[in-house]
Each structure stands twice: as structure tokens, then as C-alpha cells.
Amino acid sequence: MPVFNVAPYVAETIQSVLNQSVDDFEFVIVNDGSTDATEKVVARYEQLDDRIKYVCQPRRGITPTLNEGLRHCRGEFVARIDGDDTAMPQRFERQVTYLRDHPACVLVGSAVIDMDTGGQDLGVRATPLRHDEIVAQILHGGGCAMQHPAVMMRRADVEACGGYCEEFDAAQDRDLWLRLAERGRLANLPEPLMRLRRREDSITRSKRSSALHGKRLAARRYFERRGERLPRGFKIAHPRVPSTSDIARRSAWEAIKDGRRLLALRFAAKATVLSPFKRDNWWVIMLCLRPKRWGRTPQTGRIG
């Protein structure tokens, strides 16, 4: 787990890992030069649980920090998590079981539950399940085929691939996934095993141009390793990163389809408070207040 200035959330994250249904693991935490109270929180937990191995370093950035963490890992499998997310109690057990039951699989992820900065669930985000679908989505950049904080990898295969490529300051996970796909199978479990906090200041939001460059570079190198060039007309999607308001509005729409009017109204109100001038948010509120007219917008056929 790399951490940088996550003091408001990191205690909850650490506790979710320590509360796993299996207890035979080591917990490597690398502090990448935090300037808030993150170090105090992690140091306190280090004193309480000898499974925690705490590493402090000057600020180096996410990719070198990920590799620093890998250098301290000794287990058969490596699970990733970010310092503001939380793991379901059965996460390690489910993923270890899958990897042991499927020896050809080198990397397994899962569906996730989005939550806002306050920890309120915003809905489940599904991921493709089969190897070919995952690789195609990684290559073309449409959506997130594997959620980085939700994956578990075989350490031997990650080391054989050389770990994360430090030329990437974003999309380093996609590059590693493609290299791992050349050694074995990729998979996602349909069950949500992580809750991911959607913050406006996240790395994904703050490095959009770097992420697009990283996606293109990862795809080009994938084809080069196969002795091929990028296919003519090959395109990489770079969808807009949804805001917390967008996620809340989509969660409201899902609740509407499930017939959960009060939950839908709560999500719609949150979306509207965050983005009061966005017309779609007010449209969802109207649908919540007039349940007989629940349905899709006549203009676009969708919400959001």
C-alpha cells in the first residue's frame, strides 16, 4: 500500500486489511513523503500489529513507490490497495482461492463499490470477467478493465516482468497488466471485494494527459513485443473521468431502476448539491418525486 497525505482515511484502510478472514500475510506500507499526519497514524498501527512492515522514503512519486513496496514483499501473492480505500473481509480469501484453483491465472481483480469522500456507497462498478475481454479493454483504454487497488498478483510473475516500468508516471498498471497477460491469464471476480473512494484530487483525475500518453505507450509496446506495429486505425479511448456528482447521479438512476425511491432521492440530492447547475441532476430529482414517470430522458434516452 503506497500512501501520500491520506491521514483522514488511512486508519480505516489499515483496519480493513487487518480484519481479513485470513491472517497469514504481511502488510507492506510505503509512505511516499507525506506531509500530513499519515506517518503518525501508520506508525501507531505498526506498533500494534507485527504483520505491518512500514517503509518511509522522501517523495518519489507513485511508480517508484509501488516498486519499493514490491521489493519488500516476500509472499507468494501480492495484493494491492490504496490508502483511502477499504477491503471487504473476505477479499484475500476469495482471491487466493481463485489463484490456487486456476494456476494459469497470474492476475485477478474484482468488481468494486464506489464510495464518496464521506464513505457513502455510490453503487457497484462491474468489470469484464474473461481474459480476452480484459486485454481488449486494457489495450483500447475504454473504462478500467481491472481496478488497480483491487488486484492480486503472483509475485514470481511480477518480478519476472520487471515490476512496474518507472518510465510511466500514470497508466503504469495497464502496462504491467499487458506484460503479465503474456505470461498467463487475467481474470476478475464478479463479487465486489473493495470499496474505492472517489476523490476529486485523486491521481487519476490529476494526471489525465499523462494517463493518455501512458495508455498509448503501453499499447505500442505490447504490439512491439509481439513483433507487430500498432494496427492501422488503432484508437485508444480516453473517457472523461466521472466526478463525484456524476457517480452519485448514476447511483440514483440505478436505484430508480431497482424501485428504491428514497435511496434514489438521496443520491440525486447529493449530485445536485455538488453540481447545482447541471440539468441532469434536477431531472433525476424530478423522477424521484414523480415515481409514475420514472424512465429515461426523452432527449437522450439516458441520464448522465
Image (cartoon, grey):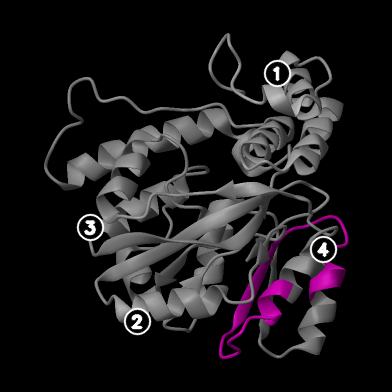
C-alpha gap between disc 2 and disc 3: 19 Å
Q: Pick the quarter of the image with the C terminus.
A: top right
C-alpha gap between disc 3 and disc 1: 43 Å
**Label 3, on which residue?**
182
**Label 2, on which residue?**
100
Asked if residue 138 is positioned above or below residue 59 in the image, the reply reads above
Q: Residue at x 52, y 33 (%)?
A: 210
For marks 3 and 4 on the same chain, the one whose residue lies earlier in the sequence? 4
Quadrant assignment, res 228: top left
Location of residue 287 in the rendering, given as x and y in whole percent from the top left corner: 73, 24
Residue 72 visible, this angle: no
Location of residue 200 in the rendering, given as x and y in whole percent from the top left corner: 73, 37
Determine crowd level at label 1: few under 14, some 14-19, many 20+ residues with C-alpha closer than 10 A: many
Q: Which residues are magenta?
A: 16-42
Which amino acid type corresponds to the residue marked 4 in the rendered image? Answer: Thr
For marks 4 and 1 on the same chain, the one whose residue lies earlier in the sequence? 4
User: Of the residues tagged 4 and 1, which is closer to the observer?
Assistant: 1
For marks 3 and 1 on the same chain, the one whose residue lies earlier in the sequence? 3
**Farthest-out residue, top:** 299
SS at badge 3 = loop
Which amino acid type corresponds to the residue marked 1 in the rendered image? Answer: Asp
**Label 1, on which residue?**
280
C-alpha gap between disc 4 and disc 2: 35 Å
SS at badge 4 = helix
Marker disc for residue 151? none
| Residue contact between numbered discs 1 and 2, judged by CB atoms under 8 Å | no
Determine crowd level at label 4: few under 14, some 14-19, many 20+ residues with C-alpha closer than 10 A: many
